[in-house]
Image (cartoon, rainbow, N blue to C red):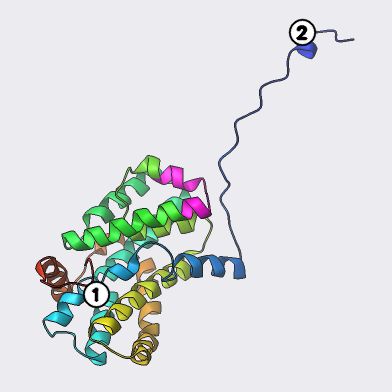
Amino acid sequence: MPTSIETIAAPPAPAPPAPPPILAPAGAAALVRMLTWLSPAFPIGAFSYSHGLEQAVADGTVHDRATLAQWVDAVLRYGSARVDATLFAAVHRAMASGDDARLAELAELAAAHQSSAELALESTAQGEAFLVTVDAAWPYAALARLRAAWPGPYALPVAVAAAAAGHGLALLPVLTAYLHGFAANLVGAGVRLIPLGQTDGQRIMAMLEPVVVAAAEAGIARPLDRLGSATPMADWASAAHETLYARLFRS
């Protein structure tokens, strides 16, 4: 027989369901997830942006395989990809360490650090689409942290880095994959615009392999006070593209 109030009290109400745990795939599983997220088939609309390259082709600056390779190389080493890599590394660290105040500062900085209106649209539209898709297919608790820390807009490097850290993906491989996808999208746009053969596009990607790796390593090592770019022609092209008469791309 129960002998105390405690023993006859009604059982406590069940706790509300916990948010999905942080998923930390290892080895091949992590590789598969990175390949999926950063595939050209991932539904963020990357195919519709040229990052100003359409303007550079229209005015003759980029007109063959060599000039396309030089353009993408410069953007990776010195341009907006350099900025993305630096911010990506910082966001990944902030998310992994639980520093939400830092995460908010970086998300705001990334949203503001855009060279033109079209590049801002390119980055933030893809960033929001990336977060929505990842949360729908791979739900994770860290997304709520990001949205609580910063209401948006979310630049693409912020979205990918936060999701990667939230899912336990290591920084160097996922940043390398991000920059490879960045380069591949530009090369693909150039192949359509100049136009070039598909094999020429793959020759450019082969040439860019060491550039992508070096850009990822440099982005991780670079302090945030060295954030910046030095590709004025690419920045000008992205701004001039806004008034280009006939366009295939949104940027």
Q: Could you tell me which residue is drawn at 34 percent across and 76 percent down?
A: 183
Check disc 1 and give the amino acid type.
Tyr
Secondary structure of the residue carrying numbered label 1: helix
Horizontal and vertical percent position of residue 197: 32, 91
Going from N to C along the chain, the mark reached first, 1 or 2, is: 2
What range is drawn magenta here? 134-146
Instruction: From this view, report whether residue 132 is shown above or below residue 243.
Output: above
Image quarter (top left, top right, bottom left or bottom right) of the C terminus:
bottom left
Q: How many marks?
A: 2
Say whether residue 56 is visible: yes
Q: Which residue is mark 2?
A: 5
The secondary structure that dominates the magenta segment is: helix
**Relative to the observer, which residue lies in front, 19 or 198?**
198
Q: Could you tell me which residue is drawn at 36 percent across and 88 percent down?
A: 198
Check disc 2 and give the amino acid type.
Ile
Secondary structure of the residue carrying numbered label 2: helix
Q: Is residue 137 magenta?
A: yes
Instruction: From this view, report whether residue 11 is shown above or below residue 179.
Output: above
Image quarter (top left, top right, bottom left or bottom right) of the N terminus:
top right
Horizontal and vertical percent position of residue 196: 28, 89
Residue positioned most to the front: 246
Q: Which residue is mark 1?
A: 78
